[in-house]
Amino acid sequence: MTSELSFDVAGRTLTCPVTAGYNAGYTGRDQRSVQAHIAELAEQGISAPDTVPTLFSIPSYMNLQTTRVEVGHPRTSGEVEWALILGGGEHPDLLTVASDHTDRALEAYDVPCAKQISPNVMADRAWELEDVSVDLDDIVMRSRVLHDGEWIVLQEGTIGDLISPMEWKDRLRDSGRLQPGVVVLGGTLPMIAPERQFADRWEVSMQRPDGDVISRTYDVHPMVPSIT
């Protein structure tokens, strides 16, 4: 099944067929910190991955450009990530911001399944990867949540804190998965206040050193109850 994403790229509208999706995990460049994080997760009952960093396969149709996410219970939350959309003849490689919205209750039992049943919420704007390659590591990534009318910063760091999009392209090439239409989310940053992550409104953004910002704000709504 092939889905499509449409981006404003420097005033042009580019439509990108999505052929496969991957969400990367445990992607900090400081792998000692990553191992410490894995140990913390183990204390919460979340099993350690077999491979670090990890690449979770995601249904292509779960990459959505939406302002509304419906959830089955309150223990779900997002996380800011860069998203790479691999080009081909139709368009160049693109970079945008996304939120990997995740079922945290399910994550404690099955991390891949928790990733696969919730959407990647993506922005409508993107940059050409080549255009931002010079200052790529300095791009600031940030997530905020709305509580009682106040925006609270939940995550903040730079792309330089994570394995780079270029390295992920090399990894995809080595595994025979580098092809047009692949979408990769590059992993996330530590939460500053994880106890505040369960919120009804989320915002994720990336900001270049020149001040140019790409963002996505979305609301989290409970699903309509089932009739059983």
Image (cartoon, rainbow, N blue to C red):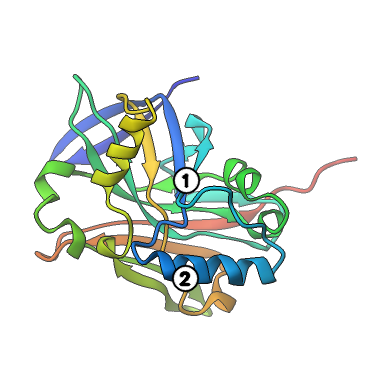
Residue 75 vs residue 181, the one in the foreground: 181
Q: Secondary structure at mark 2?
A: strand
Marks counted in the figure total 2
Query: Residue at left 41%, top 42%?
Result: 65
Residue 52 location, x and y as percent? 48, 52
Q: Is 112 above or below relative to 79?
A: above
Residue 29 vs residue 181, the one in the foreground: 29
Q: Which quarter of the picture shows residue 189?
A: bottom left
> Can you tell which mark lies on residue 10?
none
Q: Is residue 84 visible?
A: yes
Query: Residue at left 55%, top 70%?
Result: 197
- Dot 1 or dot 2, earlier in sequence: 1
The amino acid sitting under disc 2 is: Val
Q: Nearer the viewer, mark 1 or mark 2?
A: 1
Residue 69 location, x and y as percent? 55, 50
Is 144 on the left or on the right of 45, as rendered?
left
Residue 106 location, x and y as percent? 70, 53
Q: Which quarter of the picture shows residue 18?
A: top left
Tag 1: Cα neighbours inside 10 Å, few (<14), some, or many (≥20)? many
Is 47 on the left or on the right of 153, as rendered?
right
Q: Are marks 1 and 2 in contact (CB under 8 Å)?
A: no
The residue to which callout 2 is attached is 145
The quarter of the rendered structure image containing the C terminus is: top right
Q: Is 181 above or below relative to 153?
A: above
The amino acid sitting under disc 1 is: Asn
The residue to which callout 1 is attached is 120
Residue 47 vs residue 1, the one in the foreground: 47
Tag 2: Cα neighbours inside 10 Å, few (<14), some, or many (≥20)? many
How far is mark 1 from mark 2, CA to CA?
Answer: 17 Å
Residue 220 vs residue 55, the one in the foreground: 55
